[in-house]
Image: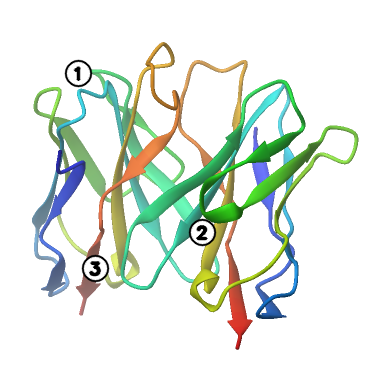
Amino acid sequence: NAGVTQTPKFQVLKTGQSMTLQCAQDMNHNSMYWYRQDPGMGLRLIYYSASEGTTDKGEVPNGYNVSRLNKREFSLRLESAAPSQTSVYFCASTSPASGRKAPDTQYFGPGTRLTVL
Amino acid sequence: AQSVAQPEDQVNVAEGNPLTVKCTYSVSGNPYLFWYVQYPNRGLQFLLKYITGDNLVKGSYGFEAEFNKSQTSFHLKKPSALVSDSALYFCAVRDKGTGRRALTFGSGTRLQVQP
């Protein structure tokens, strides 16, 4: 199993440009999440999807949109990038609470380092 | 609302010495508590978690954590530190009473183990 994969690994954008960060998991997890990591602030939740077909806002959703394309894939879109969105973005997924292995443990992708100039 | 505090930005310890990384939490109900580790340019890796039961939780790489309900703490410990333990450590919490599985993370503590 590849676990949680993210593309791209690095991206540089100019202010106002748009882009989509891709995330996929092959663990048959129901729930998926997007976080951003900034120095001294830990990880902050942007959006999450409890199950296929549902999405909800997290702590810092402004400037972002998400799509839960199917059970495997959860994408994050920046419609008009701003320098304040320079960050490292992590996707994560969670096994169902009734799962046999470490229920409620989140598994993280390797991250996308985004710079907005 | 749920929150996590990691009061130390950095912890320095000599190799072979015991280490402690501190974490306190706040939830309205009962907590699920987690520790994750992040190595440079990598995603977060799960170390251990407290769900219920025994207050001392053992995890990966020889780490353990003690849940203390009265002090609302979940400190990470290891009896003998290794240089390879040097990394960024995050504590996280989720309120058991909520249906939402999203975690709230602390700001992270950088552990530096000197040879």
Residue at 51% x, 48% y is B60
In which image quadrant can residue B48 be found?
Answer: top right
Mark sitting earlier along the chain (2/1):
2
Residue at 44% x, 23% y is A103
For residue A18, above or below residue B56 = below
For residue B75, above or below residue A93 = below
Q: CA distance from mark 2 to mark 3?
A: 15 Å
Q: CA distance from mark 2 to mark 1?
A: 27 Å
On the rendered structure, is B91 left or right of B72? left
Q: Which residue is mark 3?
A: A113
The image shows residue A79 at horizontal and vertical percentages of 14, 52
Residue A42: numbered disc: 2
Q: Chain of mark 2?
A: A
Q: Are marks 3 and 1 in contact (CB under 8 Å)?
A: no
Identified by mark 3, the residue type is Arg
Q: Are marks 2 and 1 in contact (CB under 8 Å)?
A: no
Same chain for mark 2 and mark 1? The answer is yes
Disc 2 on helix, strand or loop? loop
Mark sitting earlier along the chain (3/1):
1
Q: Chain of mark 1?
A: A
